[in-house]
Image (cartoon, rainbow, N blue to C red):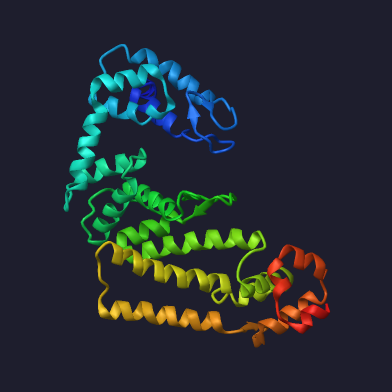
Amino acid sequence: MFLIWYTNYMDSIKSLCSQISKESKCPLCKGSFHMDECQKCGYKSVLIKECIDKLLPMLDQNVSSEELLSLYTIKSLGYDKINMLLSLSGVEDYLKSKEEKILNQSRYELSDERVMLYFIENDFPNKNKMINNLIKEMLSDNLDITDEEKLSLFKYFVEYVTSNNFECVFTSSNSKKEIIFNENDIRRLFYQKKYLELLETAFYKCNYAYQSIMLENGKGSLKEIKEKIIIDNLPGYYEENSNALFIEINCRYNANILLRDYISSLGFKMGDMLLKCYEERAKNDLDLLNSNYRVYHGKSVNIDDLFLEIISKLDINFIKEKYPILNIENNDSIKKL
């Protein structure tokens, strides 16, 4: 009995649309599909074709309102039969009316929150505004959706912060276009209602993703470049300074500022004690950024001295080619190398 129900569900309109939506971007180039073909590289999706072949005959029967909403999520693929049905049903007009009504509200019921998530997941024009509305509800502790739905919201928030240049994932991955979070840590912050810490974590991770790629491409601040060369060539330095690395401090400092600016843009005001705490943390990080001293073998060392000692043993022309910023370093010791 269970097997029959499961098979029927997997072949239902809702399930087929869900499977198609998961392949909304080409796995090779991240391009968009028209029908089952990527418009950018020409890749043909077997999954989309198989699902569509099952789905289209089902549309000859009565389709429920819930199924119409599922069909709307794959509207962009451009299948005439699906888009004709959506047009005749008036579902698009209904959704636009619902969207306008929600955007004019100041308080939301659970059903409204879930409708906003639907709009966010399906790239409606006011998606970013709805993300901000739901984050505002979360900060006010008025968000009633489940933790699973909060994870989905958090994912879209992170991708919104990075202008969709990165994908937010909750599993291990080596992709440089993914920002990885420990799902248990995020769920713990939900449970403890530490929403400011949650958003600060997001801003920190987004900053770190950008800065890491910059450094890999030979770009970044002079101090970050020098320290990267030190880390790559001096075993033990990273471990002794893991919380005081220039990239770490820079990302912490930026996350602190971005968080305060963001919650202010939502109309919130930090209490005096909390604001003072954030200001002190920012000041401490700024002091560390301005300092040229770190620790190696338990002793205080000057970054510039350590850097010069290391590059004296390396191919300086290769280093300068990889990190062009070193060519403008006003240091006689480098010029002599």
Q: In this view, does 142 lie above or below 298?
A: above
Seen from the viewer's position, the closer of residues 333 and 20 is 333
Q: In which quarter of the image is residue 316?
A: bottom right
Looking at the rendering, in which quadrant would you find the N terminus? Answer: top left
Compared to residue 81, the image places residue 134 above or below, namely: below
Instruction: Give the residue at x 44% y 20%.
Output: 52
| Quarter of the image where one finds residue 314 | bottom right
Q: Which of 321 and 148 is in front in this view?
A: 321
143 left or right, relative to 317: left
Residue lying at 36% horizontally and 31% vertically, measured from the top left: 73
x, y (%) of residue 124? 33, 40
Q: Residue 51 placed where, x, y %?
A: 45, 22
Image point 68% across, 69% down: which residue?
325
Residue at the far bottom: name it. Answer: 300
Q: Decide if residue 194 is in sight here.
A: no
Q: In the image, is 152 to the left or to the right of 321? A: left
Residue 324, given in percent of the width and then of the height, sits at: 71, 66
Across and down, in percent, residue 273 comes to 28, 81
46 vs 279, nearest the viewer: 279
Q: In which quarter of the image is the C terminus?
A: bottom right
> Quick check: can you spot residue 227?
yes
Position of residue 124 relative to residue 255, above or below, is above
Write the residue at 68% across / 71% down. Answer: 231
Question: Along the line of sight, which residue is nearer the eye, 200 or 42?
Answer: 42
